[in-house]
Amino acid sequence: MEGLGYFGEILLRRELLEAERLRELAEKADEKGVELATVIRATGAVEEADLVRALADEVGMRFVEKIHPEKVPEELVEAVPINFARQQKVLPIDEVDGVVIVAVANPLDAAGPDDLRALLGGARRPIECVAATTETIDDAINRVYERKDEAQLGDKEDEDEIDEIQDLLDADDEAPVIRWVNNLFYTSVRERASDIHIEPLDDKVVVRYRIDGRLVQRKEAPKGALASIVARVKIEAGLNIAEKRLPQDGRITKKIAGKVVDVRVSTIPTAKGESVVMRLLDKENIQLDLVDLGFARRELDIWNALIERPNGILLVTGPTGSGKTTTLYASLNRINTPDRKILTAEDPVEYELRGINQLQVHAKIGLTFANALRAFLRQDPDVIMVGEIRDHETAELAIQASLTGHLVLSTLHTNDAPGAITRLVDMQIQSFQISSTVLGVLAQRLVRRLCPHCKEPYRATLENLLEMGIDMERVEEELQALEAAARTTVLGRNSTPPEATDEAETELGDEDLRQVQQGFPEDEADDEPTLIRDIRSIGEEEAERQLRDELDRPVSTDELEERAARIREAGGTPKGGVELADRKPGEMPIIFRAKGCEECSFTGYRGRMGIFELMLIDADVRAEILKQSDSKTIGQAAQRNGMRVLREDGARQVLAGVTSVEEVLAATQANEMEAAE
């Protein structure tokens, strides 16, 4: 095709893009005045690995999947400035028989390698180019220069702190401490960390990342570098670098690998120096739907119905860090439509939600949750979210808001769902008010999700069943009930099934190793994302009911099948759920344990999912509330009507292959100890 150039011809010849799509992208590139390759990378029209591999093959260049930073000679790193490497996307990675091996992201670009040749000594030093993706090269650059920066920070061990701060203020982007701190952010995003802890010890500074809820040590620096590191963070956060005696709080906004990340910074003085904690808030990750959180279909259907109610109170409970805010945000995302006005009062506002009015409370100036809620009632809202109900005044206002026709969502710090009722009673709320306004209480915990690339299947033991809280006198009955629930587990829109490993085949044999189906393909139809999401999460029967309501007439089987067929063509499935390995009565179920691989940094886990205890305030529970029964009696009434407690729902996630017994035990142990008391 004319006008597409050599690059476009390669894409067509290798069938990476269809002619029509390529023409559209070329026109977009002309409009924006950028190269065609830039638009293709930005839109993701072609996977970058496929693109780079094709270009490398075209010019006879070798393509490398990985770069090993620890093998890059220091002498090569010293010769190449980091800014040059980043801008040109080139990096010398090895030297073999006098020939320097250079990784490049664009095999068709000769300018970068030519400039690099000059830095390395000109024609006297030949180079050989190999191709790698931009992500691979960026990652290698950060790791290689991080090693160099740590060595240079070591030279500061005996320097005076005042001199270090002065040097930092006058430094440019090539200063080792600036690159070292920037690398903290890059590495934390790459490893999916939620927090960065910079902590002084007697003889060094350690950096720990909180990954999937657990702290892991990742970096060290000499003690003499502490002042430079802390001062750099303070400068970025707009804090006072001279003030070291008082705690300070600030905020940084970073763009890392195309993601905009808000960083909340907190510093405190300690006996060994200032300690810094940075909370990372990835704005892109909060755009969740309830189907991404790990519900079983029954609980998901109930919660979906509750958040559609016009009035009442919904409570989410659990300790700090149990994912309550994420669940509330996902709920608001689900009901956020143009015909609803939604107001939130938060402390602080962690993520900005489009189309929702969010207010941050400031207790020091009198803007408390109670005052915010009082003001909200004059703003004609449909839905109100209060970050936390902490006192009688806030609870009383929430009750009044629900009675006057508003849906109120909030959180409480209780260990289980029935405990929320007794907590409200402790706040001097009358039992009849609770029973007439509270619609449901959702208690939750987060458990680490087994890495789908390396998780290892095995036959559960008797000890495993006891740890999951299964009644030994009703083992088969309880296992069948939990397996039925596990099959309905909704694992989200972007889950893919893991491949069975060779080790698993050796251990269990072919008959036991039916592949565990984990959710839904990544592709979605652009025209009906909500429909696809709903059918995935609720199943065909509920989808038929919704379609009937949508069309306002009876729906034929052909119409539903036609809609389902459109979803299948888009890469979806109207069934969803999890397929378990076959189990004969009396046999132990097949469950999974952590193993560890490169994909999960050898932890065996990648990401987190929820386990839930959803208590619906039905007639039996309402009767116990009016009788002012204790939380144990209220919980028993809810269990008789189908509520699974947290440990049972954890067992459901274990049988579904989502997490391990150890994770569920760690997440629910406090509840079991409290119940025993």
Image (cartoon, helix red, strand yellow):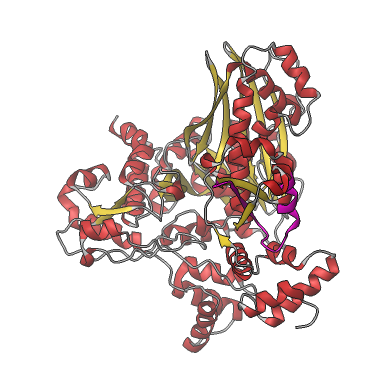
Seen from the viewer's position, the closer of residues 595 and 303 is 595
The range drawn in magenta is 96-118
Vertical relation: 597 (above or below) 364: below
Vertical relation: 454 (above or below) 319: below
Seen from the viewer's position, the closer of residues 263 and 38 is 38
x, y percent for residue 208: 52, 30
Magenta span includes 108: yes
Locate the C terminus by quadrant: top left
The answer to whether 633 appears left or right of 464 in the picture is right
Vertical relation: 72 (above or below) 364: below
Locate the N terminus by quadrant: bottom right
Residue 161 is drawn in which quadrant? top right
x 53%, y 68%: residue: 534
Magenta span includes 499: no
Vertical relation: 528 (above or below) 599: below
The answer to whether 338 appears left or right of 186 in the picture is right
Residue 251 visible here:
yes
x, y percent for residue 417: 43, 43
Seen from the viewer's position, the closer of residues 98 and 143 is 98
x 66%, y 79%: residue: 12
x, y percent for residue 4: 77, 76
Residue 352 visible here:
no
Seen from the viewer's position, the closer of residues 492 and 413 is 492
x, y percent for residue 397: 64, 39
Residue, far front: 124
Residue 14 is drawn in which quadrant? bottom right
